[in-house]
Amino acid sequence: MTETVIAAGSKSEQAYAAVKARIVDGTYSPGYRLVLAKIAEDLGVSVVPVREAIRRLEAEGLVKFERNVGATVSGIDPTEFLYTMQTLSIVEGAATALSAPLIGAADVARARAVNEEMRDCLQHFDPVRFTRLNQDFHSVLFEHCPNPHILDLVHRGWNRLASLRSSTFRFVPGRAHDSVDEHEALLKLIETGADADTIEKAARLHRSATLDAYLAQTKQ
Amino acid sequence: MTETVIAAGSKSEQAYAAVKARIVDGTYSPGYRLVLAKIAEDLGVSVVPVREAIRRLEAEGLVKFERNVGATVSGIDPTEFLYTMQTLSIVEGAATALSAPLIGAADVARARAVNEEMRDCLQHFDPVRFTRLNQDFHSVLFEHCPNPHILDLVHRGWNRLASLRSSTFRFVPGRAHDSVDEHEALLKLIETGADADTIEKAARLHRSATLDAYLAQTKQ
DNA sequence: GCAATAGTTTTCGTATACGATTTCGTACTC
DNA sequence: GAGTACGAAATCGTATACGAAAACTATTGC
């Protein structure tokens, strides 16, 4: 994969990218206390650019900031998880519907290949790989979205979701099978040029079902 | 000494609120160059908190920031306007649908009163008041949305829209009449407990129609 | 008269420093 | 032993200062 080799732009940008990456990949898990001076030292910069980075992450919802107290990685609350999923279902549904007319046969083939790999994962029980493939699959579906704002919201949603991973994001074996089937159904809809409404609804439902499965598992 | 009354929160927060307000109310219109030192002086603070504020506003899409060049109020591009409206139609539609079951008779009455005031505005041609009332009306519809993330996105959308006002946001007399009627139709749907899908679709359509009217006017 | 260039000014970017606030630990009182 | 008060340490918040990059301006050469 593309490791973040690029020491791009200002130190503020670097700090932003670095902290964001650590939150998304789980190095800093929810509730983790982000001490400015410590992060600054880790990254070899001063606190000013780190503050800026944290503020930006706060605006994206990845970080909670409290005056004179400090920053923590946000999102321990299960309710938060529910809200995040609901929001994602809406913006991702819209993004997928808007993308659909622009998805070519090659994209569908690529997505299908990914989905078959996912099916393969089910045999060997590889949740980590499954999760990554799942993201790849959905990326194909919404990456052509012509509206950059919606695309941005989708990415933010996925990032939030990823950041919550360690506490609430869990692989539900029983659900995974259905998920793969729903993926295939979505591809069929796109291939046959179904109308935007149908695709949007299907995409939403797919995510809602995933949410329900998580909730059901959590209750047990 | 009547210093600028509410010295709420940190200076960073103050700067954030102040600059945001100026962008939304049109004091700083699209393309306006935001010089850090100047803003800092205006607000009586140093540049550091101003930088933070600008970064946050950038994350919200209200400001465009370019390395070593500076910040400008974003959104002159008409395409941007289209994307903003589309995004808003989606999140606002969802927010309205989610709010609907929680909207009480009193709320409906309040919204209806506002709408009748809007109808009144049509007689006396008062675009400014009409626009404000329109916001009030929609606020009633989505303010009960239980998902804070979606609510936040709606507010951001409205803010972006407001910030674009001076260049592209224009009152379309021919459209205003239909708009008021659609508001009433929306209220009826909510009163009769229509299902979420129907309400969502109606809310979206309402905004799409507004967008179309703007576009038609722009073309002329 | 125009274009290229060198010098000046403006503005950004970040390190450092210090005051303000919170938190935590310890001692004291009831 | 529990609760409170006080002091020390940690951490945040922001002003200032200075280096770096870009934008602007004036001058020179053609």
Image (cartoon, coloured by chain):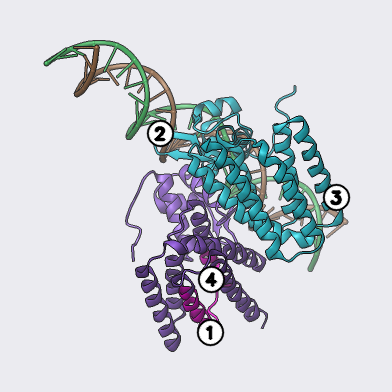
Chain colours: A purple, B cyan, C brown, D green
* Nearer to us: label 3 or label 2: 3
Q: Which residues are magenta?
A: A161-188
Q: Which mark is residue B109?
A: 3
Residue A8 position in % (x across, y down):
35, 48
Counting residues from the N terminus, which is met first, the one under dot 4 or under dot 1? 4
Q: Amino acid at mark 4?
A: Ser
Residue A189 versus residue A53 in the image, above or below:
below
Instruction: Please tell me if label 4 and label 1 are on a single chain.
Output: yes
Q: Identify which residue, B115 or B147, lies in the foreground.
A: B115
Q: Amino acid at mark 1?
A: Pro
SS label for mark 3: helix
**Disc 4 from disc 1: Cα separation:** 17 Å
Q: Residue at x 74, y 23 (%)?
A: B2
SS label for mark 1: helix
Q: Amino acid at mark 3?
A: Ala
Q: Identify which residue, B141 or B121, lies in the foreground.
A: B121
Q: Amino acid at mark 2?
A: Val
User: Label 3 marks which chain's residue?
Assistant: B
Residue A123, magenta (yes or no): no
* Nearer to us: label 4 or label 3: 3
Tag 1 near tag 3, CB within 8 Å: no
Q: Residue at x 34, y 51 (%)?
A: A7
Residue that numbered label 4 is attached to: A166
User: Label 1 marks which chain's residue?
Assistant: A
**Disc 2 from disc 1: Cα separation:** 51 Å
**Disc 3 from disc 2: Cα separation:** 50 Å
User: Label 2 marks which chain's residue?
Assistant: B
